[in-house]
Amino acid sequence: MSDASLEQSLKLLREEAGMVCHSASSHVIIVFGASGDLAKKKIYPTLWWLFRDKLLPSNTHFIGYSRSNLTVDNLRSNAMPYLNAKDSESTQLDEFFKRNSYVQGSYDKPEDFIRLNKFIVDNFSACSNRLFYLATPPSQFISVATNLKAHCTAESDGLWNRLIVEKPFGKDLDSSEVLAKHLSSLFSEDQIYRIDHYLGKEMVQNVVVLRFANRVFSPLWNRDNIANVVVTFKENFGTEGRGGYFDEFGIIRDVMQNHLLQILCLIAMERPISMEANDIRDEKVKVLRCMRPLSLDDVVVGQYVADPENGKPGYLDDPTVPAGSITPTYAVAALYVDNERWQ
Ligand SMILES: NC(=O)C1=CN([C@@H]2O[C@H](COP(=O)(O)OP(=O)(O)OC[C@H]3O[C@@H](n4cnc5c(N)ncnc54)[C@H](OP(=O)(O)O)[C@@H]3O)[C@@H](O)[C@H]2O)C=CC1
Ligand SMILES: O=C1O[C@H](COP(=O)(O)O)[C@@H](O)[C@H](O)[C@H]1O
């Protein structure tokens, strides 16, 4: 995209967001798990790009929160490799980090959330809209959400609170239902945002366009012309300190049950009645209901080991991974969609 058309697109986005951006209140974005992988690779870079492109309300501030003893400089250097900041943007980048603060605290002690609330009120006024981004392992969601609701939300009329949670939303049906019930007892549905970032990827969004806006592919997209579809997710790096989250979940819950199943659904589903979220969701659910229960004969799991030739450690060599863990870091599964299009 040329600089001119990029600027034109940003202008349109700014106009679309105008109502929010001209609001007189301040806005505070609080990132829980700010010390972690998601924060440094995705959240801080995204906040920086939004700030750089003037897509945030002018009076917006960012607070990182986690248990680690960190400073804003630490957050900056952790995120630096992922920010794609040009030399010419250094002044703006400094400006962005001046709007950042860091609060160290637990995910379960009320006094820490009371302290966080005081920090917000003292530094950015009680009249701040609040966006809470839970970039912690899901095991912390319930206690963080409970403490936020009790001690840290904006309560005046006209102010809003938003809660963003990341996948996996639970470990199984029971824990997912417990989590959903708990969150909805604290926040209304329009305050809760559940993120699957694969759905925001251009390539994934293009699947729908490729299938339904394309007269070449549309009639061919079925069992008569396609023997199978392979969805591959490969990473060329290891856990690298993420054992605290990853080991409890493993690769199936980390990416297959969410990102890859979403892609499978987009590939296999029928044309939705409209491109509205609920209509797309309904078609995805139909695909899932047509899938055969997964049999162990159709699954292979594994765990990566050290590669001494390249000096790369194995999963069990990561100090954040419990000794002797049998958590899978690799999995392959054959899934069957038993409907008229695919059976
Ligand atoms: N990494 C990524 O690219 C992506 C991750 N996600 C999701 O984001 C969430 C966090 O993942 P990620 O950032 O990779 O994980 P991390 O292991 O980096 O965890 C994030 C932070 O949470 C705290 N933490 C880690 N383990 C525990 C634990 N057992 N108990 C309490 N706190 C803990 C640590 O902060 P401290 O000790 O300082 O409090 C850590 O820095 C997960 O739900 C994941 O599915 C989603 C999309 C992409
Ligand atoms: O959700 C997750 O995704 C990342 C990979 O995301 P990508 O956009 O870089 O492909 C993965 O590393 C992480 O384990 C997982 O939680």
Image: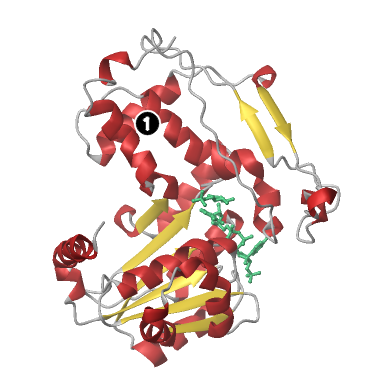
Query: Foreground: 204 or 340?
Result: 204
Please tell me in which quadrant of the rendered image residue 342 appears: top left
Query: Foreground: 83 or 120?
Result: 83
Tell me what residue is drawn at x 37 percent, y 79 percent: 89
How far across and how far down the image is residue 290, in percent? Answer: 44, 18
Ligand 1 falls in quadrant: bottom right
**Residue 334, above or below 83:** above
How far across and how far down the image is residue 315, in percent? Answer: 77, 50
Residue that extends furthest to the bottom in the rendered view of this protein: 122
Please tell me how many numbered marks the rendered image carries: 1
Name the residue tied to disc 1: 266
In the rendered view of the protein, which quadrant contains the N terminus?
bottom left
In the rendered view of the protein, which quadrant contains the C terminus?
top left
Tell me what residue is drawn at x 52 percent, y 82 percent: 102
Whether residue 164 is visible to the viewer of this picture, yes or no, is yes
Please tell me in which quadrant of the rendered image residue 111 appears: bottom right
Whether residue 34 is visible to the viewer of this picture, yes or no, is no
Query: Foreground: 108 or 272?
Result: 272
**Residue 66, above or below 146:** below
Q: Is residue 238 left or right of residue 148?
A: right
Figure colour scheme:
secondary structure
Q: Is residue 283 left or right of residue 251?
A: left
Crowding at dot 1, Cα within 10 Å, few <14 / some 14-19 / many 20+, comes out as many
Look at label 1 and name its amino acid.
Leu
Kind of element beneath mark 1: helix
Quick check: is the Cβ at mark 1 less than 8 Å away from ligand 2?
no
**Residue 50, above or below 118:** above
How far across and how far down the image is residue 238, in percent? Answer: 69, 52
